[in-house]
Image (cartoon, rainbow, N blue to C red):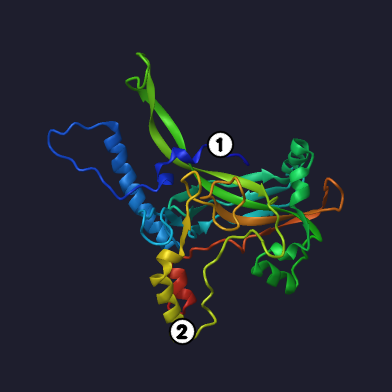
Amino acid sequence: MNRDLRPPADDPLYGLPDAARPNYATGMLLGADDFAAEQIYHRNRLARALAFASGAGARRLPEGLGDSPGAAGLLGGGTLAGLRVALRAASGTQPEEIRVAPGLAVDRLGRLIEVPNPVCLRLQRWFDGELERDGGDDLRRAALADAGRFASARLNDEIAAGAGPLPERAVIVDVFVRFVTCRQALTPAFASGPFDALDAVETSRLRDAYEVHFVPRTDGLDDDFNGLPLLDRDLSALTGAARRDALQDAVLDGWPDLAATVGADNQLASPPGHPPGLDPTAVFLARVLIGVGAGDPPARSGGAVVDNGARRFLPHLGMLAGALGLGLD
């Protein structure tokens, strides 16, 4: 659950392809690359639209154009529906679990990530596995006091209103979901490359799938860095005209402001707050604060709290209309 089982290079959209589609003519010799290019074009166009609709996009800028040639979308993506992360307490023979509900998200490339069934992680088994894996070193680095510093505004408001308190010391773990491609359905094909075989096969179907990652935050969270995704500007305090102007300016200025230089490997750079080593397109879902004592390595003490309020939410237009008082009774 914590490893990249399938490399990002499996999907050509990681390469931020140009908007070039194949052109066909009668008598033209076509190969598999031409049909792949056709799929890439349509996927890329749809993904670009979804990426910008969710807050940003991802594209390359030609050399010499703008301040950041080779730039890529910085923000964008989030939860479209579902994907609530919850703690299921132990009961009888049922162990304590972190449960991700089915749902739909869009990543910063604009790819849809659908989780069709609940995903469960046995929390104590995971904690014991971390202790065994490295002697608890990651748990030790992810254990922090005053956990409210790393919680969402919503969770802190709920605690102030009388909800249960946060642990005095907690291991901070983030839940992410990422898009992966699964190869399915082998079919006979001509051998490719330096091979001569009569029984060669190739993948005939590629399934859009997902991976869920449970990531201890060992990258130095502190008062100046909470490791949460950047959210869009809050315009609720502005008056009608000022809100209109700010929204229009955000759209007009959105293209250069939502750009970040690609990494040294010519791939998307990780967005601010993203854990090192994790797929930079993985979508943040929730933060889990696991109560631990002051021992070394840390041992569990008390329960755990799930914070869903820090993710990027992408409400549909009907929800927005209702929030603005424009919905129908």
Element marked by disc 2: helix
Q: Nearer the viewer, residue 134 or 187?
A: 134
Element on which disc 1 rests: loop
The answer to whether 5 is drawn above or below residue 81 in the figure is above
- Where in the figure is residue 63, as x and y percent of width and height? 36, 53
Three-letter code, disc 2: Ala
Which numbered disc, 2 or 1, marks the residue that appears first in the sequence?
A: 1
- On the question of residue 219 being in view, the answer is yes
- Mark 1 Cα within 10 Å, few/some/many (few <14, many 20+)? few
Q: Is residue 99 above or below residue 223?
A: above
Residue at label 2? 242
Say which residue appears at 50% left-offset and 49% top-offset: 263
Left or right of 94, for residue 240 = left
Percent of width and height locating residue 89: 73, 52
Q: Position of residue 16 (x, y in %)?
A: 39, 48
Location of residue 300 with respect to 125 vertically, above or below? below
User: Which quarter of the picture shows residue 277?
Assistant: top right
**In the displayed image of the protein, which residue is found farthest to the right?**
295
Q: Is residue 91 visible?
A: no
Which of the 4 quarters of the picture holds residue 241? bottom left
For label 1, the residue is 5
Do the residues under discs 2 and 1 have CB atoms within 8 angstroms? no
Q: CA distance from mark 2 to mark 1?
A: 47 Å
Quadrant holding the C terminus: bottom left
Residue drawn at (69%, 53%), measured in percent from left and top? 87
State the count of labels: 2
